[in-house]
């Protein structure tokens, strides 16, 4: 006779509450001598309670163990082991969970009992992934494996498809990974799996990161956070996305809401949450949290960072350990862990993360200034760039190319008789040639090509990557002529009478194309260089003069900042990094000037700057505090209180407690 309750494991939705009620009712009516039935029902209670009432789940697992001992049969023992697996999904228990799921699946094969196979198989694949046992993972996913030969339906299950998506992601086969993610999503929806959407969001997030498009998923992460507010991984991921967007204050507010990592639930996502927070805290310089996370992650340095029971991967644990060491000023420790990140990624075949770690290790080695270190850094950066080009990882490719430019700087260009061409991107996009002729574009693709090259800031990019940006979905071999025409149009815009060599401004060599930015007057480059210089007081003069000069410089820079760079291309992935750099420079410049105005008691001007900052980032904590302080000092107490209430509401929308002192 079939049971009125099925064994499932979900981490969202309301189905679990119904499952709990039905199972508890059945337990109250089951024959007290039917220990096998009791064991199974207790295991179902454990699965239904794990994310809502973990204490109830633990008790159910204990009851299952007692009942299984009394039942004294292998299937009951398997159910008891199943309950034990479910109630401890922490990374400390991963090796033991692998042993238990191996035993459970062997029992299934020996007995033919199939009910617990899907969940046991899911947990088994997750443990193999986290421990980096990729050969065994490949074997477990093989359609001709002993398990799949006996339970043929596993081959087309959502569990197998989830992990085949993971395999493709590790390999860097991004189109295959996205196709498999969508196939698994469809299977999960057909099975009414309430976790279907959050799994899809997690898998697509990593795919989009590899494609350089992670920030596209902010709405999906916000929705996931609403669906599963008990899962801090979504808040940590939002902080990471906001940091990539240049919204440092919003990211900092979220990170600092995790006052201590002891508040993180030790569950299936603890490792991923800790690693994502470590990444963000390190870049933001939140040293207290970075130190806590570093110490907590050390025991797992040889692991992959899995998300959602292994259905996708954040990379290696060693990399965030290296990043926290950098933030804490421990250069040698950072090098050690970044080497380990390379080793783990290479051993597990995690090619996108291998390229990322190789590039970052190259940067660390360059900081030593030693000749042998520079040689190793060059080799690492070249390999990272080659991998990124082969797998179409534009973000990693660009960073690796910049590292190579640092190692092998181009010789100073010969002086050119003509004046520099000018490119403006901070206001309306415009190009004025070396002859003073304003470009009139007949080709939208050529115009976009030049924008892409400007956004790369002199770093080369592969021709195939640019083709995919300009003509997505079209095979590169069909685009050679169109690309050549677009490149020629760009050269003509900069040098319409061809007075200079063909590669004077746009170099195309060995399948790579780049803009020689040193020979062109680009407003965004001038802005970034000026902002960087102005934030450092002029040395060699008295403090008062240096301060006055710095204030004038900062004011001049802010006056020249006319708005969003490349505002026509807000949805284009290739423009995101440049916008982020400009935003960071703008915010640093504005805050620096506001602090000088504070010391001069010029609170009206200071207030205007803070309000301008909030027009770009409504979550800028320092700007909110500055508005409140400036209004208070100006005597506008009612407006100050209104601003304080607005700030509190915004922080509450992030799930962040405000300070009553604000």
Image (cartoon, grey):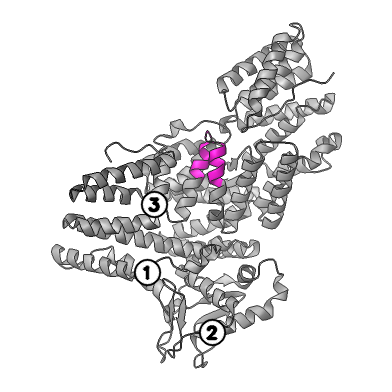
Picture quarter containing residue 607?
bottom left
Query: Which is more toward the observer, 301 or 168?
Result: 168
Q: Are marks 1 and 3 in contact (CB under 8 Å)?
A: no
| Mark 2 / mark 1, whichever is N-terminal | 2
Q: Where's residue 229, x and y in %?
A: 52, 35
Which residue is under mark 1?
A: 562
Picture quarter containing residue 53?
top right
Residue 491, labelled with which disc?
A: 2
Query: Which is more toward the observer, 74 or 423?
Result: 423
Q: CA distance from mark 2 to mark 1?
A: 27 Å
Q: Is residue 258 above or below residue 401?
A: above
Left or right: 343 as drawn, with respect to 324? right
On the rendered image, what quadrant is the N terminus found in? top right
Magenta: main secondary structure equals helix
Query: Which is more toward the observer, 538 or 259?
Result: 259
Residue 618, labelled with which disc?
A: 3
Q: Going 64% across and 47% down the picture, which residue do you hit?
A: 348
Q: Is residue 150 above or below residue 319?
A: above
């Amino acid at each position: 006779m079939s049971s009125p309750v099925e064994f499932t494991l979900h981490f969202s939705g309301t189905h679990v509450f119904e499952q709990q009620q039905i199972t508890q009712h059945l337990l109250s009516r089951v024959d007290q001598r039917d220990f096998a039935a009791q064991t199974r029902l207790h295991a179902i209670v454990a699965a239904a309670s794990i994310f809502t009432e973990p204490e109830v789940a633990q008790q159910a697992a204990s009851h299952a163990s007692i009942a299984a001992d009394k039942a004294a049969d292998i299937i009951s023992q398997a159910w008891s082991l199943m309950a034990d697996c479910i109630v401890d999904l922490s990374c400390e228990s991963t090796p033991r969970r692998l042993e238990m799921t191996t035993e459970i699946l062997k029992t299934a094969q020996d007995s033919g009992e199939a009910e617990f196979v899907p969940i046991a198989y899911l947990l088994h694949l997750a443990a193999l992934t986290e421990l980096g046992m990729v050969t065994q993972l490949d074997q477990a996913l093989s359609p001709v494996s002993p398990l799949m030969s006996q339970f043929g339906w596993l081959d087309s299950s959502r569990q197998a498809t989830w992990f085949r998506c993971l395999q493709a992601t590790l390999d860097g086969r991004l189109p295959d990974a996205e196709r498999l993610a969508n196939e698994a999503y469809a299977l999960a929806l057909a099975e009414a799996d309430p976790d279907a959407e959050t799994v899809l969001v997690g898998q697509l997030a990593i795919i989009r990161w590899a494609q350089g498009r992670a920030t596209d998923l902010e709405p999906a992460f916000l929705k996931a956070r609403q669906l599963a507010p008990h899962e801090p991984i979504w808040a940590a991921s939002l902080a990471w996305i906001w940091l990539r967007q240049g919204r440092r204050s919003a990211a900092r507010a979220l990170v600092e809401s995790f006052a201590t990592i002891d508040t993180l639930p030790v569950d299936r996502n603890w490792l991923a949450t800790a690693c994502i927070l470590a990444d963000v805290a390190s870049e933001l310089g939140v040293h207290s949290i970075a130190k806590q996370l570093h110490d907590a992650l050390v025991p797992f340095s040889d692991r992959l960072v899995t998300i959602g029971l292994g259905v996708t991967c954040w990379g290696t644990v060693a990399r965030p350990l290296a990043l926290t060491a950098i933030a804490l000023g421990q250069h040698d420790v950072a090098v050690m862990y970044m080497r380990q990140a390379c080793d783990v990624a290479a051993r597990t075949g995690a090619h996108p993360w291998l390229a990322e770690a190789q590039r970052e290790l190259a940067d660390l080695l360059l900081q030593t200034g030693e000749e042998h270190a520079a040689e190793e850094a060059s080799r690492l950066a070249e390999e990272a760039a080659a991998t990124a080009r082969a797998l179409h990882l534009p973000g990693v490719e660009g960073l690796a190319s910049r590292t190579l430019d640092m190692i092998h700087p181009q010789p100073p260009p010969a002086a050119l008789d003509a004046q520099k061409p000018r490119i403006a991107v901070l206001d309306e996009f415009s190009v004025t040639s070396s002859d003073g002729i304003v470009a009139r574009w007949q080709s939208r693709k050529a115009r976009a090509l030049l924008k892409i090259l400007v956004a790369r800031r002199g770093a080369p990019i592969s021709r195939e990557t640019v083709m995919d940006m300009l003509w997505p979905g079209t095979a590169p071999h069909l685009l050679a002529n169109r690309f050549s025409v677009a490149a020629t149009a760009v050269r003509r815009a900069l040098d319409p009478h061809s007075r200079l060599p063909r590669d004077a401004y746009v170099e195309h060599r060995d399948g790579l194309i780049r803009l020689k930015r040193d020979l062109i007057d680009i407003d965004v480059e001038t802005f970034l260089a000026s902002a960087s210089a102005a934030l450092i007081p002029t040395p060699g003069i008295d403090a008062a003069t240096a301060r006055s000069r710095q204030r004038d410089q900062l004011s001049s820079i802010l006056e020249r900042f006319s708005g969003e760079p490349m505002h026509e291309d807000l949805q284009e992935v290739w423009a995101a990094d440049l916008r982020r750099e400009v935003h960071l420079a703008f915010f640093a410049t504005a805050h620096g000037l506001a602090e000088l105005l504070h010391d001069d008691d010029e609170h009206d001007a200071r207030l205007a700057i803070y309000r301008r900052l909030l027009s770009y980032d409504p979550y800028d904590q320092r700007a909110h505090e500055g508005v409140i302080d400036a209004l208070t000092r100006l005597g506008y107490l009612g407006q100050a209180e209104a601003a304080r209430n607005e700030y509190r509401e915004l922080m509450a929308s992030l799930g962040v407690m405000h300070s009553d002192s604000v």
